Image (tube, rainbow, N blue to C red):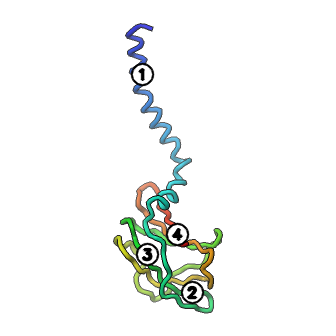
Amino acid sequence: MSPHERRQFAINFTWSWPAVLTLLFLAMLPIWGPLLPPIEGAVWPVTSKVSFVEQSSTQDGITTRMSYVKNRDCEIIGVSMDRLGVPVEFQPVSGSLDKLSTRGTGPQISRQWFIGDTNLEGLRLRFLHRCSPLWITVTLAYP
């Protein structure tokens, strides 16, 4: 191989690897994209674990408030609760204070919520926040 061919090969090889890596990164988005929200929520949680305060029993379940610390300044999208993948009724109590809205960082106490179950064992509570324009961050807040 002549020196000119060797130099041309080196230039082509050098310029082709960034292009290949960029294309590989873009091709992998559909594969690793769905995995990022729970990973981000586990590594950099938006909220701390919640503790239920001011609990009171009703005939159909429990009404409670949640105490937690918001660690990152992200927009809240929603809240979900389930037991072993089966959704549990979880809705705000009508007339309770503090609408579901984006709050600043620091200690928080939520509005009053109704949990359609009398037992908190095995329940999972997730907060859904928009911290990135590409996906919604999922933070497991309870247990």
Reading the image, the residue beneath label 1 is 12
Reading the image, the residue beneath label 3 is 68
- First in residue order: circle 2 vs circle 1: 1
Residue mark closest to the camera, 2 vs 1: 2
Quick check: marks 3 and 2 in contact, CB under 8 Å? Answer: no
Q: Please tell me which residue lies in front, 92 or 125.
A: 125
| Quadrant, the N terminus | top left
Q: Which mark is residue 126?
A: 4
Measured Cα–Cα span from mark 3 to mark 2: 18 Å
Reading the image, the residue beneath label 2 is 62
Q: Where residue 19 sits in the image (x, y, percent)?
A: 44, 32
- First in residue order: circle 1 vs circle 3: 1
Secondary structure at numbered mark 1: helix
Measured Cα–Cα span from mark 1 to mark 4: 49 Å
Residue type indicated by callout 2: Ile
Residue type indicated by callout 4: Arg
Q: Where residue 102 sits in the image (x, y, percent)?
A: 38, 72
Assess disc 2: are there few (<14), some (14-19) or many (≥20) residues with their C-alpha within 10 Å of its C-alpha. Answer: some
Residue mark closest to the camera, 3 vs 2: 3
Quadrant of the rendered image containing residue 86: bottom right
- First in residue order: circle 1 vs circle 4: 1
Assess disc 4: are there few (<14), some (14-19) or many (≥20) residues with their C-alpha within 10 Å of its C-alpha. Answer: many
As displayed, is residue 97 above or below residue 101?
below
Q: Residue at x 40, y 16 (%)?
A: 8
Secondary structure at numbered mark 3: strand
Q: Residue at x 49, y 78 (%)?
A: 51
Residue type indicated by callout 3: Tyr
Q: Where residue 137 sits in the image (x, y, percent)?
A: 47, 61
Measured Cα–Cα span from mark 4 to mark 2: 18 Å
| Quadrant, the C terminus | bottom right
Secondary structure at numbered mark 2: strand
Quick check: marks 4 and 2 in contact, CB under 8 Å? Answer: no
